[in-house]
Amino acid sequence: MLKEALPSFYVQFECDVDASRTPVRRVIVFLEKCGFDRNECSAWEVAIQEGVNNAILHSATAEPPSRQPIAIEVMVRPEYVEVLVHDHTQGFSWPISPSLPEPDSEDGRGVYMIQQLMDDSDYLRGTHSNRLLLRKNRKLTQALNAKDEEWKDKIRKFEKQLDEADSALLFMQEELSSCYESLSAIFKFGTELGKLDDIQDFADRLLKQLASIMEADCYVFRTCEEHRRTLHTYATSSSSYNIGALKWIPGEQQTNLEPLAIVNRKDVLRDTQQEPLSPTDPLAIFNAGYIQVHPIIIGEELIGVLSVGASKSEEPFTSAQTNVMHTFADFLALQLINVSRQEERVEYGKISKELEIARNIQNSLLPSEWPETERFTLAGECITSRNVSGDFFDVIHHETDPNKVLLVIADVMGKGVPASIFASIFRSLVRASTENFTQPAVLMERINKAMFHDLSGVDMFITAQLAYCDFEERIMRISNAGHCPLLLTSKESSQKISSISPEGLPLGVVRNPDFEEVEISMPDGCRMLMYTDGIVETTTRMVGNELLGQKRLLRWFEDARKVDQHAEGFKVSLKGLLKAYNGDQLKDDQTFILLVENE
């Protein structure tokens, strides 16, 4: 499905005050067409014109004067509008907190006005050009306004329901003021809140008390299964009632009392002498003269249904008794919800604790120490987006030769516990296959054969990369299973960055794939980076959710490789780049390994 293109506008004009007025006005016309009101457009016109004037002023005072054109770029987003004013002057320093200039001074007045009118502004100086960035948050869009009105309507309806409930409660209190037994029962059970050990016993006692107040001799209370149109019997006045689960089909005509009350979402009171029950109605077992059925609905959710019958009464239930029934039923339903939520919280706490333990175990499987030789250093990091990760890396030392290591990095499709389990299995298989230490392609085939059945059975796969390094012979053998390319270069700027990605499908895709193995020489001043796709797919919210991407990663690697520092220094630099893009929320696991040769 194609995304709707967001509005944008671009105009370029000569570096002259008179020539700038028409383009600025065209920008304002564009904003008006985008639905901005007069006040917003006026603020934008002043801020943009002041920014353009500033650029023209600095071009005139430059040595020599700059006559290159000025450009205005407008980007309209749902949450904000951003305007960039491009100039080719020497630029100036943008004050962080400008103050209002003296009345007889014109210098700085435009910058002060811009910062007062905009929500955010900055001046970005470059080698050949500069950008004045103006940003202003938008008022709610029409769609958001509609959504806001929808919620306001819901709130008004809810408040109306609350008002009606308050009125009903006041009416009930007035009618029950003379009934000490009813009030004392409500307060008695209210004092037990928060001290419930057995919710079933609590429900039985509450319903027996209700039957006594209503002068009833039979009842059945059912609770609803979540997401199903089935109610199960929770409590009855007699153990002899053999009442099974209640099911109903929406849209069909209902004759039995409980489905009728549920579908209509209101009480049903039946005088069985005047209107006998259907022989198939489960409540016929009451053999009662009057039966009242109350559907219990909290918010919009059906919680259950309470049915009460009186076989000895010659009068129907009074409004006071009906109100007591509603109060007791809703009161009981809320306690059941609270108990259920408490159980969910306890269970969630257990799961969170277990996930924390799992994370600690998984972290303990990652390398705690990195091998170092006289010239080579290693470093790596696994930054997880959840408690446990599907990313994995490892450094396996040769048993006798410290100049030989196997570097391992992998990314299991998906996140969370399933991915972390496969990552642990992958690690175990790699470490159990030391006889293939120097043959990455053979090792990759062996791992795929061992994991194919389990991975394909759950439609998952693993991308992986193995790199055998011999620092003495200065060779590297690489095998790849659908993973991101390995980046290799030298400290010398004349050495291009090589992107090495031998052919090979991800593990678990086919049963017997062919994995290519590439052997390369390690250049002098070697710099190498292995990484997972979470690195290049991380985004920044600073400018339009832009991807970090392969190009920016290569640009960082190009700059960082020239610095004479150990692998740990490169690691700190790369984490700083990722942090700048990630912000407060990490969407995917990010894992990398760095190999650096130092003089």
Image (spheres, grey):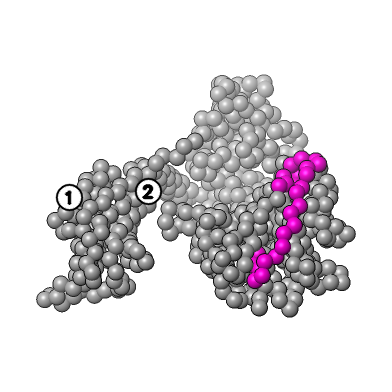
| Disc number for residue 489 | none
The amino acid on which the numbered mark 2 sits, given as a three-letter code, is Pro
Taking 537 as reference, is 401 left or right?
right
Q: Residue drawn 87% across and 72% down?
A: 400
Q: Residue furthest front?
A: 494
Q: Magenta stretch containing residue 526, yes or no?
A: yes
**Helix or strand or loop: what does disc 2 sit on?**
loop
- Give coordinates of residue 423: x percent, y percent: 74, 55
Residue nearer the viewer, 242 or 37: 37
**Compared with residue 563, is residue 43 higher up or lower down, i.e. above or below?**
above
Q: Pick the quarter of the image with the C terminus.
A: bottom right
- Give coordinates of residue 159: x percent, y percent: 40, 47
- Give coordinates of residue 242: x percent, y percent: 75, 33
**Badge 2: how crowded within 10 Å, few (<14), some, or many (20+)?**
some
Q: Magenta stretch containing residue 386, yes or no?
A: no
Q: Residue drawn 55% across and 60% down?
A: 554
Label 1: which residue? 22
Q: Is residue 146 visible?
A: yes
Q: Residue drawn 76% across and 40% down?
A: 510
- Residue 150: name its quadrant: top left
Q: Mark 1 and mark 2: span between their CA atoms?
A: 27 Å
Span shown in magenta:
503-528
- Residue 356: name its quadrant: bottom right
Taking 521 as reference, is 227 left or right?
left
Label 2: which residue? 78
Q: Is residue 219 visible?
A: no
Residue nearer the viewer, 61 or 494: 494
The amino acid on which the numbered mark 1 sits, given as a three-letter code, is Thr
- Residue 98: name its quadrant: bottom left
Q: Residue drawn 51% across and 49% down?
A: 179
